[in-house]
Amino acid sequence: MRNRLISLAALTAALISTPLGAKDAKEPSIPSEDDAPIAYLIDAASGQVLYQRDVDRRFMPASITKVMTTFLAFEWMEEGRLFPQQVYGVRPETFKQWHRKGSTMFLPADARVTVDDLLHGITTVSANDGAVVLAEGAAGTVEDWVAAMNAKAREIGMTNSHYGTPNGWMDEGKTFVTARDLGTLARAMVTRHPSKYRHFVGAKGLKYNGIEQRNHDPISGVVPGADGIKTGFTNQAGYGFLGSAKRNGRRLIMVVAASPTGRARNRAARSFIEWGFKSFDSRTLFANKARIASARVQQGGAAQVGLTARGPVRISVPKGQSPKVSLTLRYEGPLQAPIAKGEEVAELVVSIDGMPEHRVPLVAREEVLKATPVQRVFNALRSWVT
């Protein structure tokens, strides 16, 4: 990988000289290791890591598994393979196995239930029965649905996770995740499907089949801007939570896991998300469509190609501090023509003192075609002169 340090002294100086705001008199804290041995916090828009602890440790997610079932349903809706008003029945064997087993939406044996109701049951009351009925109805079998879950996980970059069920019920360790992968999943959900996320996630409760149940999400309705996402518990893994909140246009995603009690998990989750909002300021490094850098091109009609991000490049910096910020361009170079406009060809590495490294994919701002014979001669002469 070719590294190039981008000289942006003026930008860094401006960032440092900008008042970042005084620290609050009393700030929430990072959860203790006793309350949350695993802790992860990211900015949803940029993917920047604000805090991480043991984020690549595998654990059993239990009902947090249902976030992948929900995300896969969103993806299939987008592709036209699944529709909210589709109606599924409950197979006799499914009813026998999942009736009142763990958390449930109390689907009756003769239920004719819509995808919309099933997803609300899954996201709001963690319906084990609803997740299985959705999987069988949408994919034909649970096995085919789970295969699609794992394929989708690989597609979005969950490199250290595997699913064995659609609902997270104990399966002898076949289902496991990491906090980093759960952050990737949640970010994909909220950025790819914001309207579906708003519709299906974060309801305070559910009334179905004449039974009212409340959502046990520990931050929604307690922390301003909080709207999900999912709790989980197993005796082996402890208590976990994948959560998100949005304030003033800024969304944070967090994971706390391996907590010894539900109370410890809830305390950790509330403190952690508040700490994230109150401890960082967001700054724009590059506006949308700005030319960030250029990369050398070989055998092309142009010697260089401009590079940009897919949106504005923003970073979070600690409030009240002036950290050193350095930017490095990385790409396998020189690039080989042809290059399509919008093709991902490089990455911008943002290093902020005291924080994890942050990487931003960069794409070509323009198309670069293969050089014509005349252009090849000109390029050779230019290379010889330079």
Image (cartoon, helix red, strand yellow):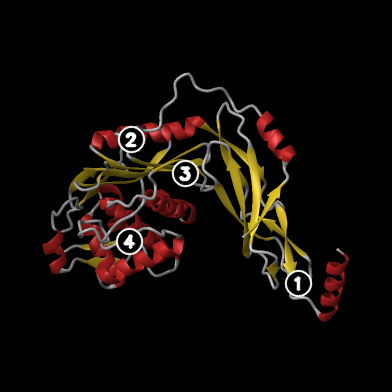
Q: Residues within 10 Å of mark 4 (few under 14, many from 20)?
A: many
**Disc 1 to disc 2, how far (Cα)?**
54 Å
Vertical relation: 283 (above or below) 75:
above
The structure residue drawn at horizontal position 63% and vertical position 56%, both measured from the top left corner, is 330
The structure residue drawn at horizontal position 53% and vertical position 47%, both measured from the top left corner, is 45
**Disc 4 to disc 2, how far (Cα)?**
26 Å
Label 2 secondary element? loop
209 vs 63, nearest the viewer: 63
Q: Say which label, 2 or 3, has the lower sequence index.
A: 2
Label 3 secondary element? strand
Q: Say which label, 4 or 2, has the lower sequence index.
A: 2
Side of 159 relative to 108 (left or right)? right
Which residue in the structure is indicated by mark 4?
162
Which residue in the structure is indicated by mark 3?
42
> Which numbered dot is residue 321?
none
- Three-letter residue code for mark 2: Glu
The structure residue drawn at horizontal position 73% and vertical position 39%, both measured from the top left corner, is 9
Which residue in the structure is indicated by mark 2?
33
**Disc 2 to disc 3, how far (Cα)?**
18 Å
Side of 326 relative to 358 (left or right)? right
Instruction: Give coordinates of residue 47: x percent, y percent.
Output: 51, 48
- Give yes or no for contact between labels 3 and 4 (Cβ–Cβ under 8 Å): no
Eye-nearest disc, 3 or 1: 1
